[in-house]
Image: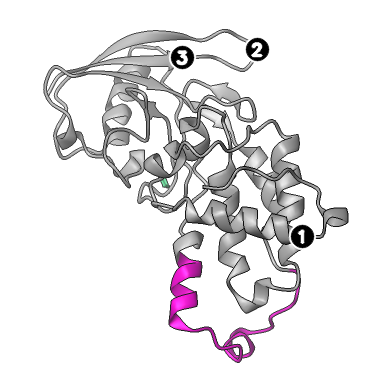
Amino acid sequence: MRLTLHVWRQPNADTDGRFVTYIADDVSPDMSFLEMLDVVNDKLATSGDDPIAFDSDCREGICGTCGFVINGIAHGPEPATTVCQLHMRHFKDGDELTLEPWRAKAFTPLKDLVVDRQAFDQIIQRGGFISASTGSVPEANSILVSKDIADDAMDSAACIGCGACVAACPNASAMLFMAAKVSHLAVLPQGQPERYERVSSMVAAHDSMGFGNCTNLGECSAVCPKEIGLDTITRLNADLLATPRKKRKGHITSAP
Ligand code: FES
């Protein structure tokens, strides 16, 4: 296959970016999207040009490091698929692809397709954990959790924090990310002692870092590679509403 790539190139946050066009030749349908970019980068490096910067680590769809927008869709056209797991067989010879970084006020551009997602870490630092010691593995197992609840928690814990939800949302809201992190602890017994303090603090952190509010458009869930559902946002809002008004630090969003 031969593809035309229009790639966002931007040296750093202080310099304006622009699209630069490259031709990707001899693309195998068995390549992953990132492997295709690796080949393009090898050619750029060989000719003395600066390779295209993009994030990746596991390349197995589990770490959440990769991610950019392909033809207007976060992680590209395949549902429930990270860009590292997207294969070139989903494209055809002659396709033109436009590659852009996540665009959101809270994600500072670093270089080309790479943005700084530390804002997610700061939201987690405000409550995405439990502080009670659960001891060693045998002690943790002394608290029995039913299969239904364990499955519910794991559905939310599947969030890999890639940022696609923010990139897809016209409000650049991180509500789906935060709701997944809140939800997986909110249904477990270990998450109960700090349940309401957690949601209040995380929502306050979310709002203070420039993420927008949720207006129930659902674009976030549509592009989520782990198919996190909007019901997690409903749970987040219910927990925030259940937080005593004097202790509430964040906004009440509209619930789906
Ligand atoms: S590189 Fe880890 S999820 Fe894509």
Between 13 and 41, the one lying in front of the other is: 13
Residue at (39, 12) in percent of width and height: 48
Image-based side of 56 in relation to 251, left or right: left
Is residue 66 at all visible to an observer of this figure?
A: no
Residue under numbered circle 1: 243
Q: Nearer the viewer, mark 1 or mark 3?
A: 1
Question: 34 or 229, which is in the foreground?
Answer: 229
Give residue 41's position: percent from left, percent from top. 34, 23
- Residue at point 33%, 12% (across, down): 47
User: Given the image, on which type of amino acid does mark 1 rest?
Assistant: Thr
Q: Is there any visible trace of residue 166 in the rendered image?
A: yes
Query: Which residue in the structure is indicated by mark 2?
Result: 14
The verdict on residue 151 being magenta is: yes
Mark number displayed over residue 9: 3
Residue 153 lies, with reference to residue 52, above or below; the image says below
The residue drawn where x is 72% and y is 34% is 209
Type of amino acid under label 3 = Arg
Sort mark 2 into few (<14), some (14-19) or many (20+) by Cα contacts within 10 Å.
few
Residue 2 picture location, percent across and down: 15, 19
Q: Amino acid at mark 2?
A: Asp
Secondary structure at numbered mark 1: loop
Which of the marked residues, 2 or 3, is nearer the chain's N terminus? 3
Q: Earlier in the sequence, mark 1 or mark 3?
A: 3
